[in-house]
Amino acid sequence: MSTSRTFARQYGVAVRAMIVFTLVLGVAYTALITGIGQLALPAQANGSIVRSGNTAVGSALIGQSFTDADGNALPEWFQSRPSAAGNGYDAAASSGSNYGPENSDLLAAIADRQSAIAASDGVSVAQIPADAVTASASGLDPHISPEYAQIQVARIAAARNLPVDEVQQLVSNATTSRDLGFLGEPTVNVLRLNIALAGLAG
């Protein structure tokens, strides 16, 4: 009898502890952190949604492709860096290619991308930055380097019949400096840049 009562008491304590900790850590803590996020950083807490007018067109944290149905770059848009996530920028399959720097498939893909960019943007291969031809580790990076944005300016200005200076100014306005002035590199968010581009006449 004593053993049965001891077991029942221990079982009851375990069940009550599970219920209490579920409520405290699974419900109350989650609600608290969600509330703090909504109050302190509502845009980030809700996915950093980017809007064009009243329409949500994506997230500032996830890149997009600006290509036709066959995967060809559309000349009137700034192009993102390549993606190895699923079929491209698939947040459910975030990953890099995991190819080493001497992998033949990677080297062939880089060479193909360099040739395509050199032809479309009228630049030499030496002018093409690394982010234009390689995917990020996540495959979702929404940013490109200012250097990659700059070599696309002339193509876009011609495709849209816009003054080069106007497109150049968009790139300058969209360039974000290093975090805290010294962390990382300057970047350009392609989606936001293309939304600003769409706002220009031409």
Image: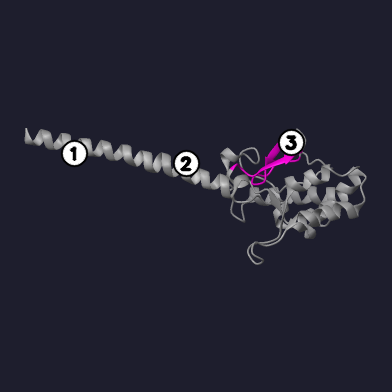
Provide the residue designation for mark 3: 54
The answer to whether residue 139 of the structure is visible from this angle is no
Label 3 close to label 2 by CB (< 8 Å): no
Lower position in the chain sequence, tag 3 or tag 2: 2
Which class describes the residues within 10 Å of circle 2: few (<14), some (14-19), or many (20+)?
Answer: few
Mark pair 1, 2: CA separation: 30 Å
What's the residue type where badge 1 is placed? Answer: Gln
Query: Residue at the location (40% across, 40% down)?
Result: 26
For marks 1 and 3, give the CA distance: 57 Å
Are there few (<14), some (14-19), or many (20+) residues within 10 Å of tag 3? few
Q: Quadrant of the C terminus?
A: top right
Query: Label 1, on which residue?
Result: 10
Tell me which numbered mark, 1 or 2, is placed earlier along the sequence: 1
Tell me which numbered mark, 1 or 3, is placed earlier along the sequence: 1
What's under tag 3, amino acid-wise?
A: Asn
Residue at image mark 2: 31
Q: Nearer the viewer, residue 13 or 101?
A: 13
- Left/right of residue 139 with respect to residue 123 in the rendered view: left
* Label 2 element class: helix
Q: Which residues are magenta?
A: 46-66
What x and y, as percent, mark residue 142? 68, 48
Callout 1: SS: helix
Q: Is residue 201 left or right of residue 24?
A: right
